Image (cartoon, rainbow, N blue to C red):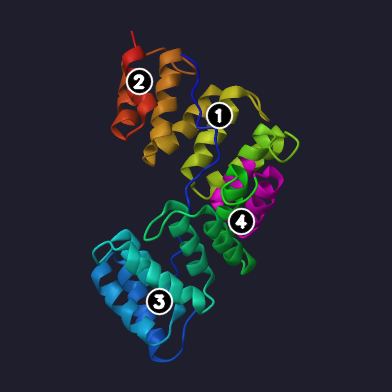
Amino acid sequence: MASFLKSVCQATLLVSLCLSGVYAGGEADRYFDLAGDAYKNKDYSKATQYFQKAAEMGSASASNNLGVMYRAGQGVEKDYEKALKYFQKAAEMGDAKASNNLGVMYKVGQGVVRDYSKAAQYFQKAAEMGSAEGYYNLGLMYENGQGVEKDYSKAVQYYKKAAETGDAFGYDNLGVMYRDGRGVVQDYAKALQYFQKAVEMELTDGYINLGGMYMRGRGVEKDYSKALQNYQKAADMGDSYGYLNLGVMYANGNGVGQDKEMARHYFQKACDLGNQTGCQYIKNIK
């Protein structure tokens, strides 16, 4: 059984929530802080109430956060149209996170008809205001040619911008681009460095990709033990591809004694998390 790696760039769209930093002043600050404390304590109903009060007093960040709450159904019934309304209100007040979140809504078609062009425009606006999520999401659009002409070089440019702001997803996707030579000259050493940065920030995909580098001996000496450690870490964080790759290592006997029962166990774990490749691999175990 061949090694399986989740080798594509991380494609998760980043939604922006703000719990500190941009306030409207006065009483709105107090309600915003109370909402932030309630959110951190997972009291979403109370957080929504306080964000509502802060929003009514002119806090753009609170309006954005209300949009996030309605989009996710946290403390309120899920309502994409209301989420869109709050994102629009905050964006009109110059909130970068809200512009990014509007881009996500148009990208996936929540509360609006899907429109990649508008999504790219909102991500661009967020990026121009220095939003890490905006940079990252815009990079995805250029990588996939959605709403813009496909351009790997620009994708790399925006992933770098996201990484420079400390974004783990930006580092991980940069690693993939350097590993695969898309938009840049292929460079396993640089790819390894970027995956390591993502791992330092506890990103599950970083562990998967770093494990793959050790598995294949790319930019580093082949080391099945370190590959196993990274896949195990991803699995411990609930990542289906972590379990899938652990299953492959046990099925092949890479760095461990070949153990088909252990392989089946890990493939089942991946399958239980919705990974269809894991479900298929269970059937292939003889």
Q: Secondary structure at mark 3?
A: helix
Relative to 190, is 37 on the left or the right? Answer: left
**In the picture, which quadrant includes the C terminus?**
top left
Counting other residues with Cα less than 10 Å from the Cα at mark 2, is it few (<14), some (14-19), or many (20 or more)?
few
Whether residues under marks 1 and 2 lie with C-beta atoms below 8 angstroms apart, the answer is no
Residue identified by numbered label 2 = 280
Residue 43's quadrant in the figure? Answer: bottom left
Residue 173's quadrant in the figure? Answer: top right
Percent coordinates x, y for residue 19 in the rendering: 43, 71
Instruction: For marks 1 and 2, give the one nearer the viewer.
Output: 2
Q: Secondary structure at mark 1?
A: helix
Q: Which of the two labelled residues, at mark 1 and mark 3, occupies the earlier sequence position?
A: 3
Name which residue type carries label 2. Gln
Residue identified by numbered label 4 = 162
Counting other residues with Cα less than 10 Å from the Cα at mark 3, is it few (<14), some (14-19), or many (20 or more)?
many
The stretch in magenta equals 150-175
Residue identified by numbered label 1 = 212
Q: Which of the two labelled residues, at mark 4 and mark 1, occupies the earlier sequence position?
A: 4
Q: As displayed, is residue 268 above or below residue 122? A: above
